[in-house]
Amino acid sequence: MNILLAGGLGYIGSHIAVSLLENGHDVIIADDLSNSKIEVVDSIKKITNKEFKFYNADLKYIEKVEKIFAENKIDGVIHLAGYKAVGESCQQPLMYYENNLITTINLLKCMRKYGVDLILFSSSATVYKASNTMPLTEADELGPCNPYGRTKYFIEEMLKDEVASGSNIRAIILRYFNPIGAHESGLLGDDPNGIPNNLLPYISRVVTGKLEVLSVFGNDYPTPDGTGVRDYIHVVDLADAHLKAIDYMQKNKDIKIDFFNIGTGKGYSVLNIVDAYNKVCGGKVKYKIVARRSGDVAELYANPAKANKILNWHAKYDIEEMCASSYNYENKKDAK
Ligand code: WQD
């Protein structure tokens, strides 16, 4: 298939690009470089030895989206173009609503106009209500608690409405848990600008001496060791879920819309991650316990049974492999 990857140079998009190219698909990447780097184009080409078209385009502008659809024969869209920082979304909610929603509306309008019927949307575990019991299934109650999560939720609703309207559009929605890790080549990984908000890039920078010490946000949660528990999923396993999802929609044309949790089903605490990282780097993770971070929940992990069964997708990498790949990426980046 010829797939438009909207937001395809980002951390997750770049790994999906590699998986698609290595599995016989063609890709067109559109990205505005607001949270990604142009060098990623070369990294994807180097890993796959394949060529693809890249558009430096902000998809909030319909004419930019229109140009991509007019110039290419697109069979499906994987939509990852969006801002993703929870804290920033609380400070600048309108920027989040404008960017994440308008980009989606523009993609859907062009899909209708050019007869493209398949969209895969990158959603998040944050769409679920915090009061649900773990593990989360796709049938659990939705109710995000920050603007970022609400953009994901509204886009899911928009897709439901668009599908229900009788248009030809079919949608598959993947709700990611906590993607971590990096490509085995060390050429692609999570490289946020400034001080990282997320746990793994923060630890990687502590281990390689760029940051002093990890602050563990709270050790008084009702969890086995008191620190927050999450469902960490290797980004390469996550990318593979996209391939399986596309395949599923191709083989089951009667499916108009479906939703899947993409996690391993296993919860790890912050201190479990510190231990796993220490094993791969030789015990260099300095940490201190500080107060809880506002907005954090004690535990969040998936029941991935639906994706396991229906998509025939299974996470392959364990937590030490995830940490080892992050460490490898951080070291290779430094060596450049
Ligand atoms: C993980 C755990 C922290 C940093 C967020 C978004 C989610 C998704 C993934 C999407 C928590 C603890 C963290 C640190 C720490 N984003 N922690 N010290 O908050 O589960 O999910 O990222 O694009 O939508 O909400 O991920 O990596 O920030 O935190 O102790 O310096 O690590 O409290 O328990 P989170 P995270």
Image: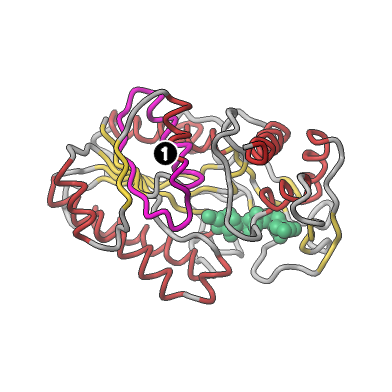
Quick one: which residue is furthest to the front in this view? 336
Can you give x and y, in whole percent of width and height, for residue 336 in the image?
Answer: 62, 37
Mark 1 sits on what residue? 41
Kindly identify the amino acid type of the residue bearing the numbered disc 1.
Val
| Residue visible at 44% across and 58% down in the picture | 34
| Residue visible at 34% across and 30% down in the picture | 247
Using the image as rendered, state which of residue 216 and residue 30 is in the foreground.
30
Using the image as rendered, state which of residue 60 and residue 93 is in the foreground.
60
Q: Looking at the figure, which quarter contains the N terminus?
A: top left
Q: Is residue 227 above or below residue 172?
A: below
Q: Is residue 20 magenta?
A: yes
Q: Which residues are magenta?
A: 10-39
Using the image as rendered, state which of residue 139 and residue 82 is in the foreground.
82
Q: Is residue 208 magenta?
A: no
Q: Secondary structure at mark 1?
A: helix
| Residue visible at 70% across and 53% down in the picture | 202
Can you give x and y, in whole percent of width and height, for residue 250 in the image?
Answer: 28, 31
| Residue visible at 44% across and 37% down in the picture | 16
- Residue 160 lies in quadrant: bottom left
Instruction: Kindly tell me whether residue 145 is visible in this rendering.
Output: yes
- Residue 97 lies in quadrant: bottom left
